[in-house]
Image: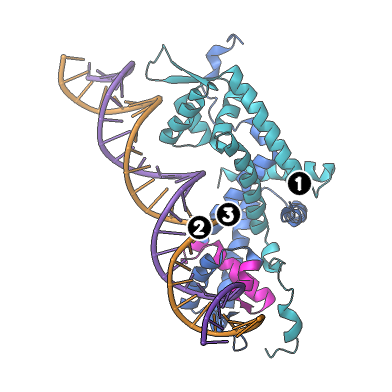
Chain colours: A blue, B cyan, C orange, D purple
Amino acid sequence: MDELDGDDRGADAGRAAPPSLVGLSTYLLSLTGKAARGRLAERLARQGLRLWHMAVLAALADFGPHAQRDLCARLSVDPSDMAKVIEQLARGGHVERTRDPADRRRVVVALTAEGRALLDRLTADAERVQDELLAPLDARERAELHALLVKVYGGIGDS
Amino acid sequence: MDELDGDDRGADAGRAAPPSLVGLSTYLLSLTGKAARGRLAERLARQGLRLWHMAVLAALADFGPHAQRDLCARLSVDPSDMAKVIEQLARGGHVERTRDPADRRRVVVALTAEGRALLDRLTADAERVQDELLAPLDARERAELHALLVKVYGGIGDS
DNA sequence: GATATTAGTGGGTGCGCACCCACTATAGGG
DNA sequence: CCCTATAGTGGGTGCGCACCCACTAATATC
């Protein structure tokens, strides 16, 4: 408790992160996640987009046209926010909005060819971020990490 | 394009996340990280704290007293923001600020006994979050995940 | 001793995200 | 027909985070 080693400490102590944090998976997950999110968001921002735009495009690509309300449910987004995302994608010609003739309250959102092309570009971006971020890992480790993340992700919803 | 299967789609299609996103480690990392961060932040918030408070406590616990400026460097925080974090921790009696007699511009920040106790509590919180979040993984998988995250984390700084 | 430099502080800004409310249009039930 | 519920929209709010600037106090330089 008294400082027997007081002198040589201050010099370079500088860079290392606190081990008691690095020992916590929670913390590492939070940090690496933040890095992933940040880098991806940055690339999206270059095209005036945010993560939700990509998520919406992906949902449409994977599951086909959605009523806007269903998109909200699927992605757990506030309807109001979803409206803004869709609006922007529509302005860019990446999705098409049509009134559902069966229930004219509903707006059916569908991916356009341009939208799909955009999604492909964004996916490529995400893969580049991945290469960057997972550079310290070899292919097998990346696969392992991915598998583990899928498991964790699967458990997230059911709290 | 025509809806041969139109009827059974709308019904439940609801919940699943877009596979083309789940296929991206970047995305999973971002999501799980967000979950980790969110849950941890929520627990910290109950005590009026944020992640930086915990990081500062941990840094002090691991490396001993710091000049405020060195804390900033270590944790990559803006000095101005650090001042606020320290101020709050000091008000709570979790750190002690003393002027460095050698250079009276510097403020040396040291952990108090209460601070260490607080850190212990926060760490326990983090571990609880971890148990919650990593519930789908067994012990071996958790260890693997942790090791992979450490690797990834190690590569983050050097862009 | 005047001047530049550094440590800490207070205040303010902009962004992203999540959330909420009010409003319109359509649909359905009595 | 009236009344309630639902889909989408526009606008606004609060929070956290990161960043930046102006200011004071204490050094260091000449």
The answer to whether residue A158 is visible is yes
Q: Disc 2 versus disc 1: distance between alpha carbons? A: 28 Å
Type of residue at label 1?
A: Leu
Tell me the tag on residue A42: 2
Q: Mark 2 falls within which chain? A: A
Task: Say which residue label 3 marks.
Answer: A37
Mark 2 or mark 3: whose residue is earlier in sequence: 3
Which tag is nearer the camera, tag 1 or tag 3? 1
- The one nearer the camera, C7 or B152, is C7
Q: Is residue B67 magenta?
A: no
Quadrant assignment, res A109: bottom right
Name above or below for residue B113 compared with residue A102: above
- The one nearer the camera, B69 or B109, is B109
10 Å crowding of disc 1: few (<14), some (14-19), many (20+): many
- The one nearer the camera, A98 or B147, is A98
Task: Say which residue label 1 marks.
Answer: B134
Residue B34 position within the rendered picture, expressed as x and y whole percent measured from the top left: 62, 50
Identify the residue shown where x is 67% and y is 27%.
B120
**Are circles 2 and 1 on residues that touch, CB within 8 Å?**
no
Identify the residue shown where x is 61% and y is 77%.
A67
Q: Secondary structure at mark 1?
A: loop
Q: Is residue A60 magenta?
A: yes
Type of residue at label 2?
A: Glu
Q: Disc 2 versus disc 3: distance between alpha carbons? A: 8 Å
